[in-house]
Image (tube, grey):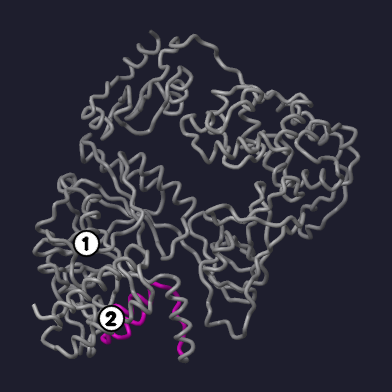
Amino acid sequence: MSEPAQRVEELRDEIRKHDHSYYVLATPSISDLEYDRLLEELRGLETKHPELLTADSPTQRIGDAPVPHLEQVEHSVPMLSIDNTYSLDELKAYFERTDKLLEGQKCSWVMEYKIDGVAASIRFTDGRLDLGLTRGNGTVGDDITHNVRTIRDVPLKLSGDDIPDVLEVRGEVYMTNEELSELNDRQVAAGGEPYKNTRNVTAGTIRLLDSSIAAARKLRFFCHGIGLGGGLKATNHMDFLKEVAGYGIPMTPDVQLFDSWQDALAAAAKLDESVPDLPFEIDGIVFKVNDFAVREKLGMRSKSPRWLIALKLERYEATTTLEKISVQVGKTGAITPVAHLAPVNIADTTVSRASLHNADEIERLDVRVGDVVVVEKAGKIIPKVVRVEKHERTKKLPKFKFPVACPKCKTELVRDEGGVYIRCPNPQCPAQLKQRLIYFGSRPGMDIDGLGEEVVDLLLTHKLVHNYADLYRLTVEQLGELDWKKQRKGKDGKLVEVKFGKRNAENLVKGIAGTKERGLARVLSSISIRHIGPRVASLITAKYPTVELLRKATTEDLASIHEIGDRIAKSLHEFLHSGYGTETLDALAAVGVKLEDEVQVTEAGSLPLEGKTLVVTGTLVHFKRDEIKKLIESLGGRASGSVSKNTDYLVAGEKAGSKLDKANQLGVEVLTEEQFRELIES
């Protein structure tokens, strides 16, 4: 090989690695300037030695000339559509129908984001990209190869040695929200109209005849399926994604695997409640049977496979003006920026406020007071600002300056070590006190009926409460005559001044007093110690059931408790030995709040499940899932969610799935419900 040819190959390999690091792994390995120099060197060598130029060279990302028109090409394997569901009930019904078709056969499921882009099929022959098609009508699609070649995260040449002769992958071409914002800046500057959303601009761009325009718009690609794939080693979806990722093809992100459809349905419910912040748009979530052989068994309908379904998420957005940014102080001191918006209607509700999450999010969005912003409500999520319409920024707007001191107590703010949150470190901060008292009275806290935000405001305004213990010192006489500004019901909604009243006072004092016997775990999870929630508090007090024992425990002692770990242990230990923590617990003890938990004292080894780890799977007859879990823990055992070599018993009900198979593979003892009952009764 000649010296120029050798250098050309070296440059191509190096550029491909940098492309993969930047576009697929999102971990840039060199600067833009260094990358451009490598590309220029390669382009210069190819110009000087045209015989060395190949179609898969990184310099060929942009075609020399527009194609005259889009050719239509038949798909080697039809690109079928996906059936949609629009509610969790419909999704459950689909899973149950599939269960019947499989006649009890085990089946694991994968959950993926449904990217809001344009479906495409990309074929590699002998490791080189040679065809890109739109879905079209499912049988025939438009040839968009010239534009697919401009997508930086799609390799022109696959990586690795053992590559299939022909590999055809299906996926989604999309655009990031950030790129849409930058594109609209350029569009408006050129006198054009801004694009409304990422999907529309992607659909238009991928069909352009001029690939140089497509290249400038920086489209992206995620692979989520297979078309023609002779030579693939994978026999299930998760392994397929790993295999194609090994070839350098970007796989769809954050894919989750579930042993049963029940687990998948539970995950769907959580995602429906709170869609995560993503740099791209999604319009649903997709569920697929993981195992290819099970897919074959389920087969196809006329237009869609039986082995996958999409749950469409309601997504609403609107454009409005950001009028102000304020910051709120939370119960653990976290400073949260809030966007105050010109009121706008989204999904039949008027939205005037939206979370901006943290200082890093403000920086990422580059959002400024006076900006026109896109606000989104997806599913049941709290409204959020997803994009700034920078082309609408007609004048220079100052950047938002995140405060350096707490807006309430003026204490200097600190950033979490290695984290994104900025906090007020002053435990006596009035703003924190208010939020802590509200949480203390809430249902997840001590569950005090009547101690809501309005009443907390009333108590703080009259300076009757300075800490948790002060709540237990309140009297009916003190509260009954308090002047209370309440919002009057009716059309005017004006504030009117009334007396708190004897009945309200009696109910509140009684409600507070009734929490004295709740015990140490409930108190620990109610007084806003960072990382200490109800479950963590219960795990800790199971080993240290009194506050005296807890105070003697070292950080290492606490961290050694199963499921606790160093971060939680450090947070609790610091609280217990801080001036604020000591005063808080001592004051609660002084007013009669019980700071110990009842524990069943037993001789070592006397509990039937002591030291044993159990996993429960399948449909049970005699127990609900939560009931059997609590029973296991009360009898000294640990209820785990996954089977491992450390599992002592698997309790298997009807339709036990992959957990039963794994238990058999590992030699874990399997119990029926009756055998489990015999074990604990013995």
Q: Amino acid at mark 2?
A: Leu
Residue drawn at x 45%, y 89% is 192
What's the magenta region? 192-217
Asked if marks 2 and 1 touch (Cβ < 8 Å), the reply is: no
Q: Nearer the viewer, residue 677 or 243?
A: 243
Question: Picture coordinates of residue 350 (x, y %)?
Answer: 62, 63
Magenta-span inclusion, residue 200:
yes
Q: Is residue 261 above or below residue 83?
A: above
Number of residue marks: 2
Answer with the quarter of the image where residue 495 lies. bottom right
The reply, left or right, for residue 186 in relation to residue 37 is: right
Residue drawn at x 25%, y 61% is 81
Mark 2 burial class by Cα count in 10 Å: few <14, some 14-19, many 20+: some
- Res 80 label: 1
The reply, left or right, for residue 88 in relation to residue 14 is: right
Alpha carbon of mark 2 to alpha carbon of mark 1: how far?
Answer: 39 Å
The image quadrant where one finds the N terminus is: bottom left
Q: Nearer the viewer, residue 542 or 255?
A: 542
Local SS, label 2: helix
* Mark 2, residue position: 39
Magenta-span inclusion, residue 372:
no
The reply, left or right, for residue 232 in relation to residue 403 is: left
Q: Amino acid at mark 1?
A: Leu
Residue drawn at x 83%, y 31% is 473
Question: Picture coordinates of residue 434 (x, y %)?
Answer: 74, 47
Q: Nearer the viewer, residue 473 or 492?
A: 473
Local SS, label 1: loop
